[in-house]
Image: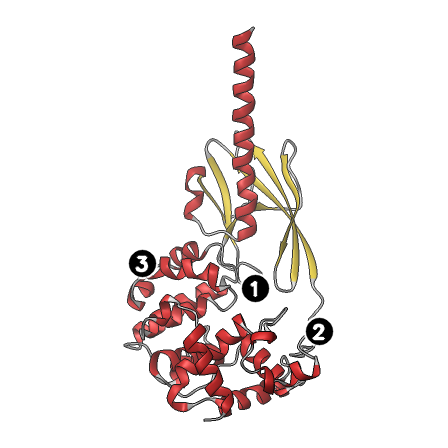
Amino acid sequence: MSAFPLTLLHWFRENGRDLPWRQTRDPYAIWLSEIILQQTQVKQGWDYWLRFMRRWPTVTDLANATEDEVLREWQGLGYYSRARNLHAAARQITVGGGFPTTFDGIRALKGVGDYTAAAIGSFAFGLPVAVVDGNVYRVLARHFGIDTPINTTEGKKVFAAMAQELLPATEASDYNQAIMDFGAMQCTPQSPHCDTCPLAETCIAFREGRTSDLPVKLRKLKVKERRLTYIYIRCKGMTAIHRRQPGDIWQGLWEPWLTEEVPSGAVLLCQNVKHVLTHRVLYADFYLYETNERPPLPADYLWIQEADIDNYAVPRLIEILLSSLTSLARRLATLCLQRTSLTSKQ
């Protein structure tokens, strides 16, 4: 074993993160953590992992849930395709008779890519397959001075081959966790801790003063802006919601009336609420429309009791907009109390 993996393993045994999904070899628990953490920081994802494990302790339990239940539990994490894929894969596993134990079998699960399959395979089954995520790209690019862009086909091949070559086959699980933790805690994107780094003496980026330049990434696509106007209808204790369809953002989640025509009498609650997605920036206006007659809506809108709206999974933006209704109710209650107080004094 070369000095690089030996140093990382030693560092990991002294500094590795104590995470609950590392205390088990259960592939379901490990897979769940990897899906949650795909676009989520550990601090936020931890609570979601615990909630999922409490509610659905086995993959069969998750498979027997409805998609709506899974989306509702996922609410707030974003990137909802992860939740839909998680649910679909749980059913794949159940139909297949159990969690697959080979890299190809794990890779065939819905929503599982090369990194996730390698992570599950090495952590749960000790498979000698190297993980390559953002942390790994950064550590390898800096230490070995690689300036091939990481988001190109060539870059992915170069880093995957190097990661696999460096992997100690008999300690795949610990080494994969070590290099990821090292990137997350020591060789961080901004202000890496080079002064205390055990690899500093052999790190090309440190020696050449290029830590801020590596890894190299080609410029992203231009971010587009999109404007949305939502109307919250309040009609005799009922409101109308709509499930978003495939082919757009937030597939399968629910939202209030989305329209370009604001009805007369609607009250503006908040305006230009900014919400950032991967390649899009959304700006939303939110109105309250109180009426005694249901307005004509497309056939796919569902009328529900206002009190039941929390039973439906909504995007984070809609959650923010709906909170303005609570703020309005509080303001009205305060105003009512003030008026009552003034009347009693008179």
Provide the secondary structure element on which disc 3 rests: helix
Amino acid carrying label 2: it is: Arg
Amino acid carrying label 3: it is: Arg
Checking the image for residue 219, the label placed there is: 2
Q: Is residue 199 above or below residue 256?
A: below
Q: Classify the position of the N terminus by image quarter.
A: bottom left
- Image point (49%, 51%), residue name: 314
Which of the marked residues, 2 or 3, is nearer the chain's N terminus? 3
Q: Residues within 10 Å of mark 1 (few under 14, many from 20)?
A: few
Tell which of 69 and 301 is nearer to you.
69
> What is the x, y in percent for residue 208?
70, 83
Q: Assess whether mark 3 and mark 2 are in contact (beta carbons under 8 angstroms).
A: no
Cα separation, mark 3 vs mark 1, equals 32 Å
Amino acid carrying label 1: it is: Gly
Q: Is residue 345 found left or right of 154 in the rendered image? A: left
Q: Residues within 10 Å of mark 2 (few under 14, many from 20)?
A: few
> What is the x, y in percent for residue 72?
42, 54
Which of the marked residues, 1 or 2, is nearer the chain's N terminus? 2
Residue 298: in sight, yes or no? no
- Image point (54%, 73%), residue name: 186
Residue under label 3: 54
Cα separation, mark 2 vs mark 3, equals 41 Å
- Image point (46%, 87%), residue name: 6
Q: Classify the position of the C terminus by image quarter.
A: top right
